[in-house]
Structures are given as structure tokens and as C-alpha cells.
Amino acid sequence: MSGQGACKQGDWVEVERVLLDPSERAAGLPEDTARQPLKMWVKGFARTSARVGETVEVETMTGRIVEGALTDVLPGYTHTFGRPPAELVAVGRDLRARVAAYRAKEGR
Amino acid sequence: MGGSSADVLARRGEIMKAALGFDYAVFERSPIAFDYEGLMASHGLTIDDVRAIQRAAGVGGTPIIELRNLTDLVRSYAEPGFGARIFVKDEAANLAGSFKDRRASVSIHVAKERGYEGVIAATSGNYGAAVASQAARAGLKCIIVQEAFDSRHVGQPEIIEKSRLCEAFGAEVVQLTVGPELFVVMLELLEETGYFAASLYSPFGIAGIETLGFEIAEQMRELTGAPPTHVVITHAGGGNTTGTARGLRKAGAHETKVVSASVDLTGLHMASDTDFNRKSFTTGHTGFGVPFATWPDRADVPRNAARALRYMDRYVTVSQGEVFYATEALAKLEGLERGPSGNTALAAAIALARELPRDATVVVQETEYTGAGKHHWSQLAFARENGIEVRIGDPADNVPGTSIVIPERPEQIAVREIDLDRLRRSYVRNALEHAPEGYEPTPEDVAFLAEDSHTTPAAVERVIEELRAQA
């Protein structure tokens, strides 16, 4: 969430919609998937003002009109590189030392 | 979803025919056989035409780089006289950061030429970004349908990054929770918009990858005087193996051994909501690699142009921890920081180079871009958050979905062989099961099955007899 609880007409927003209830889902799904609805998120320009959770129509980048519950205004991304895994931090140092030792042994 | 899924699925044939601009029915020969080479030639493009299309699209012509430090690392522990030279084709140099640009460029060229207003592809991988990038350049609208989240609305950092990149290139991204109904959503969107289906598995897409194999043969002739002895290919849906191998053959590299490699995700269910985020690789894994090799026509088109079993000389697996280790080694030893999924073949190449003589040449045929989310650090942090144990040890102890074991030493990197005869048998069984009940395979069918699984008609006959005896 961007922290904004409502959108105005023309804002870039995200909406959510349930496409299939659990009872409508495909046959043969694993049980953990079958008991969940199939949900969809789409982004677009809001066609009216709305508060988060309210139904709103958006016009997507391709010009399609999609209706759904408003979930976010100016939806963004927060994925990162994160911290280095402790299991990998010494790999570079150790492998460089091995290559150097091998070349020294070969007289290169 | 408008109407019921069953209604949409019943219209599948006509929707795909309109969305691809041609009819697969003309290539059908029997309930089992079809004219594969006829299908592959149906676009009428020569490899030179495809190269020209790709040059204009800013795609292809990527460098091959010799990995001298990694080669010496392998030689430091290989038996005397062993340790093949390792090279990598740096496909991350394509516009959207992977070899998938090759695939997308031909589809978008065809869509544009045939007057479609836009394109649609169903993919959570690099292909989405490739289609979005090529569509932007061609002035076509673009919708990418992604399986992005589990039911908690949590997605792999690698997939979220792909959503971001597709949007950066101006695509509409339709993000879904886990489930095979994604295919129905795609069909509905094709019907609603009248856009072109930029399927991963059309003959256009595979023609786009042929240039990759062709370039490898050409560049290796320049660098070493001969085509490579081995090309190692990260294998998922089969397009990479199929296109690359066909390109090698078109360049006359008939002696080059084609080795496909997947990350071992045995035991994880591809349609499971809970397993979805227990995978630390979103592609290049056995969850696609094995089912697509043994039944390629499970794809979103009536006949899959990607038929990996035709072209594999070997099929090997590596573990997740080995690929993350290889990714780290590539950055630290070779100054090449690349995305983890594309390094599946690299991990396999490190193991293969050890068992090959020094004058052998092993080409890792792709890299992919890296960035926030699409990075081995992010994938490992995410694995930990989802309860996967990450530790240093013997990678043979890796259990997909439970533990990721980072090797202690490079010597521990090893490939596990998948028995191709077992896959062939499974392929023949699938082909027979998909034919109408009681259908008797003709000699033409047997010849087709033999060709399609890279074996002899006699071997196919034997499998058919065995399957009958079991039934």
C-alpha cells in the first residue's frame, strides 16, 4: 500500500478481483489450491474516485476496462537484493585463492 | 471470468486459430503423427530472414566469452588431462536481458506484419519482458498474464521483478494466484481483444531461437576453429533446447553434443498453492522440463514446436544450491553478475567440464539479466522466509522445498543423469493415451514417434508392445 486510502479519477491504481470461487475451480487441483479462490490484480487509470476496498473501474495500459476492488494507489515495488547469504560470502575469496594456487603450481 | 471455463475451453481451437493466424490442422497426419518440419517451415522465413528481423529489433549478436578462471578452477581438481574449456554466450546482452528476446522478436514481427493491434503471452518468466520490450518497439499493445502470487498475495522476488519490468516496457500485466486456469484467462483475453497469441511454443518463437545455436557455431569456429564439442542448455519448456539444436544443425555443427540441464525440483507440485513459494527457481527446473519433454503438446498451442526429446543427447539435473554457488562463482571469478535461473546450465557445465578432456569445448548457451529480486541473494533470503533451510554441506543432501545445500567445494558440483529411454517410453505412452481409444498406431505413426523421441522405429515398437503387455 502506498499509504493513500483513496483515489481520484485518472489516478494510476491497482484493483483486485476474484475470478473463480473455490467451488468453480478446475477439476484435479491439489487440495491446497482447490480451496482458494482464483484472484487477479490489474493496474490502470481509475475512471472514478473510490476508497480502498470499494469497487472501481480502471482503464488499463491497453485500454481495457476492468472492474475490481481498489487495493492501492500508485502501486510500487519494494523487492531488493537483501543481505548477502552467509553461506556465499567466502566463495569468491576461496575460489580465487584456489585458481591462484593452481596457476602457481603450473608455473604460470 | 465471463461465462464458464468449459465454454471458453470448448472454443479453444477457434480462438487460437484466430490468434495465431494459421490452422494447425493442415499439418495433422493421424491421431498421433503430424508434419513437424512442415509446421516449422510454415512461416516461410529462412535463418537469414530471422537474423535480419532480429538485427532490426536490436536482438541477437551477443558475445561469447571464454571463462578462463572457471576453466582453471575445474582443472585444479580434474584428473590430469581433463577439464574442458568453458565458454558462455552472454544472452543477457539482449534488450530485455535474456535469450527470450529472440523468441519474442519473431512473434512480434509476424503479429505486426499480419496487422494485429496487440499481443498476449502467458508467462511469469523473462519471456514476458521480452514480449513487452519488442511490442513497445513495434508499437503494439501488450498483455502479459502471470501466475504471480500464492493465496496470501506473496510472490517470489524473481516473479515480482518480472512484473515490474513488463510494466516498465508499457505492458498491461494481469497477475493471478496459482492455478492452471491461467490458460482460460489467456483465452478470454485473446477473444476479448483479438490480439495475437505470442505463444512460447509457436514455430515463430522457436525460429527465433535457431539464431542462437547458429551464432554459437559461427563464433566458436572463429574462436577455436571448430564448433563446440558440447552445448549445455537450461531446459524448461523445451524451446531453448529445440531452437538451439536446430540452429547448430543449420550451421553444420552436426557433431556438437546437446546437453539439456534443469534444476531438480522433484517432489514439488506445480499447481500447489503452498509449494509455489517453496521453489527457489521459477523456471529451468524439472517441474517443466520433464513433463514438457515427455508430452510437449501440453502447451497452449495445438502442436508444440518445442520438442526437446528430438534433440537432447543427454539430460542432466543440478540442485538449487549448486546453481546459486555457480552464480556466485561466475560473478567473483569472471566479473559476470547474471541471474540465477540462466546459470543452471553453467552449474552443469562446471560438472561436465571435469569429465571431459582439455581440448573439449563446452558452451553454456545463455545468461540472463540480474537485478533486485532477480538475484541469488534475494532468492535465498526469500527461501529462508518461507521456512526452507539454507546451509553449507554436500549438495547431494538437497531436498527440493525443504533444504538448499550450498556446496562446500566446487568438486561437489555434480550432474545427475536422467535416463532418456525412460523419458522416451513415457512420451510414447502419452502419445498413445492421447489418441482415440482402440486406435492402432500405423507404421507412419511409429516412424513419427521414433523421430520425435530421437530413437529407432524398432525401439518404439518394443515400447508399444511392453505397454500393451502391461495393459
Image (cartoon, rainbow, N blue to C red):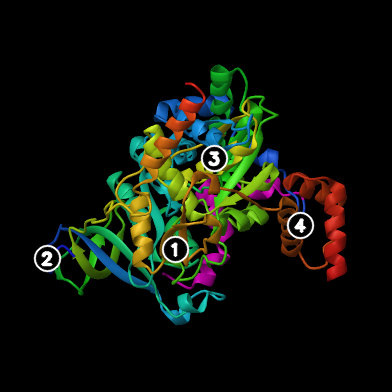
Tell me which chain the residue with mark 3 is part of.
B
Question: In what element is the residue under mark 4?
Answer: helix
User: Dot 3: few (<14), some (14–19), or many (≥20) neighbours within 10 Å?
Assistant: many
Give the residue type that dot 2 points to.
Gln
**Any mark on residue B185, and which?**
1
Image quadrant holding the N terminus of chain B, namely bottom left
Closer mark to the observer between disc 1 and disc 3: 3
Closer mark to the observer between disc 1 and disc 4: 4
**Location of residue B274 by image quarter:** bottom left
Percent coordinates x, y for residue B410 in the rendering: 50, 44
The lab-note entry on whether marks 2 and 1 share a chain reads no
Question: What predominant SS class does the magenta segment belong to?
Answer: helix
Quick check: B364 above or below B33? Answer: above
Closer mark to the observer between disc 2 and disc 3: 3
The lab-note entry on whether marks 1 and 4 share a chain reads yes
Q: Which residues are magenta?
A: B1-29
- For the point 56% across and 36% down, which residue is it? B207
**Any mark on residue B350, and which?**
3
The lab-note entry on whether marks 4 and 2 share a chain reads no
Q: CA distance from mark 4 to mark 3?
A: 30 Å
Give the residue type that dot 4 points to.
Arg
| Residue indicated by mark 4 | B425
Mark found first going from the N terminus, 1 or 3: 1
Question: In what element is the residue under mark 1?
Answer: helix
B129 lies left or right of B66:
left
| Residue indicated by mark 2 | A4
Q: CA distance from mark 4 to mark 2?
A: 57 Å
- For the point 67% across and 41% down, which residue is it? B311
